[in-house]
Amino acid sequence: MKGHDHTKLLYDVNSQMPKDEVLAGLSELFAVFGDSTRIKILWALFESEMCVCAIAELLHMTQSAISHQLKLLKHAKLVGCRREGKTVYYYLADDHVRSIIDQGMEHISE
Amino acid sequence: MKGHDHTKLLYDVNSQMPKDEVLAGLSELFAVFGDSTRIKILWALFESEMCVCAIAELLHMTQSAISHQLKLLKHAKLVGCRREGKTVYYYLADDHVRSIIDQGMEHISE
DNA sequence: ATAACATATGAGCAAATGAACATATGATAA
DNA sequence: TTATCATATGTTCATTTGCTCATATGTTAT
């Protein structure tokens, strides 16, 4: 046999691991948080719901770029939106967003 | 003026936003969680510290690929390591890893 | 010293990603 | 209806990312 033996350990660890699809879903969620533009959008929405063009102005980015990112955030169920005439307001979907970001902040501020 | 006015809102939201470097650091942290290989490695380390070749075997990946990812995880201070002879054991750096992943799990299981 | 094992690292490449641009859709007002 | 504003979407392109391969480093035993 090549290398030393891990059979027992691997068996134990493996039995505790969630299915691949779950772990894939988890990493996809974190990947959404893993971009500074999207983090900024989420942080902005902590304060209040905002329309697309306001976010674009705030971040000094094009309306298109923001719209694309909002689509991702919405797909990840991190934000929701409501239409009011021509304007579409985006808001945080739930409190998980806040608690996930809070945990991240705790880690980096050490 | 082009488009409707957001001056007041933008001022308020902006005053609550952390500095760009902080938000960049935050997104970089989440980006580390945003890959299924790294999530699997972290999850494995929940059970026990493990050497590089054991992780590689567990995930059916090359030693090199795992080593590269461990370097990232270490740089993000999510894991630490200790050497014992030829073998290097990696372990979770602190409890933040667990709580961040827990929060993520809560969000996707709905 | 040399051999064998465990890990780390640099280069190269295919795939994924984020933004810009152009354009399409939706909604309101004239 | 047409014009205008707000948003959405498709395409393109440069950058980044994750893996493989080859090779280097580190450690122990002979």
Image: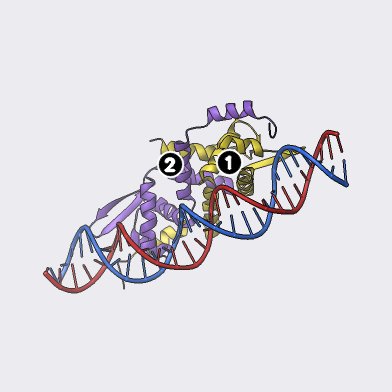
Chain colours: A purple, B yellow, C blue, D red
Q: Is residue D23 left or right of residue A49?
A: right
- Identify the residue at horizontal 65%, vertical 30% (top origin): A6
Quarter of the view holding residue A2: top right
Q: Chain of mark 2?
A: A
Which residue is nearer to you in this view: D7 or A21? A21
Residue A26 vertical position relative to residue D11 in the rendered view, above or below: above
Q: Is residue B9 visible?
A: no
* Disc marking residue B61: 1
Which mark lies nearer to you, 1 or 2? 1
Task: Check disc 1 and give the amino acid type.
Answer: Met
Q: Which mark is residue A96?
A: 2
Viewer-proximal residue, B32 or A51? B32
* Residue in the foreground of this view, choosing between B4 and B33: B33
Which quadrant of the view contains residue D27? top right
**Residue A97 appears in the rendering:** yes
SS of the residue under disc 2: helix
